[in-house]
Amino acid sequence: MTGMDTFPEDDKRWFMHIGYLAQNWAAVETTLDGIVRQLHVYYGGAKFEPSPPQAFNRKRTLIRKTFAEHPDLAGFSEGMAKFLDDATRLAEIRHWALHSGWVTEGAEDVTLNRYSRSEPLKWEQQKFTLDEIFAAGAECGGLSLSLTWFAQRAFGIMTEEQLIEFFRKLSSQLGTPFPDEDPAD
């Protein structure tokens, strides 16, 4: 018997889905770290940040600024902005899931509670379903692959053929669908 055996099955399902979201968000963050380091070393990102940032908001700002200002990356700026918008939305869901007290309302629904960011003594609440948490986790998995694809193309590190072969293998291992279209287009 393990410690997990003491929890009701419904709670274990929530733990599993929140863990799935957390793990796939970690893949997004790791991908952003790689992008930030490329920008920092090869594309003048150090003029915006003296060292590679760790916080998501600072990474996002550095990536946006460097893509917008560097002539080799400016053509990819709009596409990167879309990915960063997706990451920002998913970061908020992850933040709710990992940094809130939660109360399950049956097997499929939860209310998450946290202190307000703007009013320190006020509670905020957000409702999620189990399917929404899982979908956010799956979207994070796909976003990490898309960001990697996009960055490889923007930085000219791999040819399109090499990328297709690499990502077909990786997406099948992760159980994430391979994108039908090139995210860099």
Image: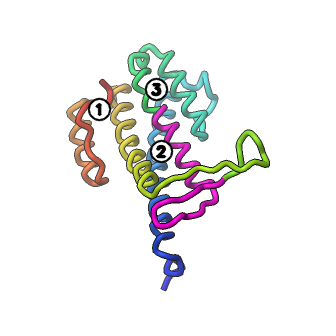
Q: Mark 1 and mark 3 in contact? Answer it, CB < 8 Å.
A: no
What kind of residue is marked 2? Thr
Q: Nearer the viewer, residue 41 or 16?
A: 16
Local packing at callout 2 (Cα closer than 10 Å; few below 14, some 14-19, many 20+) is: some
What kind of residue is marked 3? Ala
- Quarter of the image where one finds residue 54: top right
Residue 161: where, in percent of width, then height?
A: 20, 33
Residue 167: where, in percent of width, then height?
A: 27, 42
Residue 30: numbered disc: 2
Callout 3 secondary element: helix
- Its colouring scheme is rainbow
Q: Is residue 9 left or right of residue 127?
A: left
Residue numbers of the magenta segment: 85-113
Residue for badge 3: 81
Residue 169: numbered disc: none
Callout 2 secondary element: helix
Residue for badge 1: 158
Q: Nearer the viewer, residue 127 or 119?
A: 127
Picture residue at 60% right of the left edge, 55% below the top: 112
Callout 1 secondary element: loop
Residue lying farthest to the bottom in this orientation: 1
What kind of residue is marked 1? Met
Q: Is residue 144 left or right of residue 92?
A: left
Q: Quadrant of the C terminus?
A: top left
Viewer-nearest of discs 1 and 3: 3
User: Is 149 rendered above or below residue 78?
Assistant: below
Q: Is residue 121 left or right of residue 2?
A: right
